[in-house]
Image: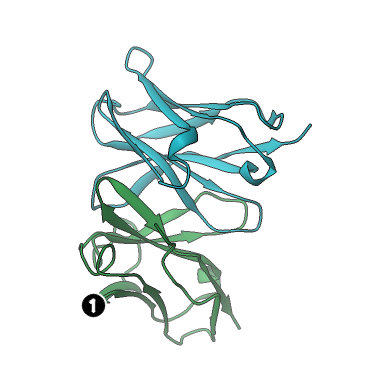
Chain colours: A green, B cyan
Amino acid sequence: QSALTQPASVSGSPGQSITISCTGTSSDVGGYNSVSWYQQHPGKAPKLMIYEVTNRPSGVYNRFSGSKSGNTASLTISGLQAEDEADYYCSSYTGTSTWVFGGGTKLTVL
Amino acid sequence: QVQLQESGPGLVKPSETLSLTCSVSGGSITDYYWSWIRQPPGKGLEWIAHIYYIGSTNSNPSLKSRVTLSADTSKNQFSLNLSSVTAADTAVYYCGRHTVAQGIHYWGQGTLVTVSS
């Protein structure tokens, strides 16, 4: 069970859009519509931002959106704001009741 | 509102067993999946194991031989035992509630466990 692959860091200016990729295999990301995205600020527990590839929990701004193509899922944040600066993690179901996280991406708002 | 709270020793000696409990309020542990996730200092998240209803559990293959999960429905709690710990097991340990597909909607605040003599 290998971790999903994410870029170590991304950056953008306020108001811009950024996309974070999450690459797995046909046994996890590509095999199930069970990709989730989490936002984590320093010293805090992760917060669910996207589930089932494209769905937003109640209370999450619609500036956050998710998609998937093949074995790669993506999180897009539009209208970037200073408060979006955080670490972001993807996660996927891998079958047989196991899950895997990505290595995490540090988002810097310039 | 569902709330989760981890508890347990903050310091464990090498080769001993790490034991943590997650207390749940606002929902029954007989519903949903309940997982343990950890995060070593400065590193990423790692899914450890889950328990689904009583008796159905599974673990990360890399930790499977050292992980034991249990649940106490009378106290609405579930627990993690991780045996033969080393410094590499030093991490913030979180518990969380989820379904198969819908992600971890509810997280505990996390508890730091340090493995050191």
Residue sitting at 41 percent across and 33 percent down? B3
The answer to whether one can see residue A89 in this image is yes
Crowding around mark 1 (Cα neighbors within 10 Å: few <14, some 14 to 19, many 20+) is few
Instruction: Identify whether B26 is placed above or below A61.
Output: above
In the image: residue B44, left or right of residue A20: right
Which of the two residues, B9 or B84, is positioned nearer the viewer here? B84
Q: Residue furthest front?
A: B65
In the image: residue B86, left or right of residue A68: right
Which of the two residues, A30 or A47, is positioned nearer the viewer here? A30
Residue A55 percent location from the top left of the image: 24, 63
Residue B80 percent location from the top left of the image: 47, 29
Which image quadrant: the N terminus of chain A?
bottom left
Mark 1 sits on what residue?
A70
Residue A80 percent location from the top left of the image: 47, 79
Instruction: Identify whether A44 is placed above or below B35.
Output: below
Instruction: Identify whether B91 is placed above or below B56.
Output: below
Q: Secondary structure at mark 1?
A: loop
Residue sitting at 62 percent across and 35 percent down? B85
In the image: residue A12, left or right of residue B28: right
Residue sitting at 61 percent across and 50 percent down? B40
Which image quadrant: the C terminus of chain A?
bottom right
Which of the two residues, A17 or A98, is positioned nearer the viewer here? A98
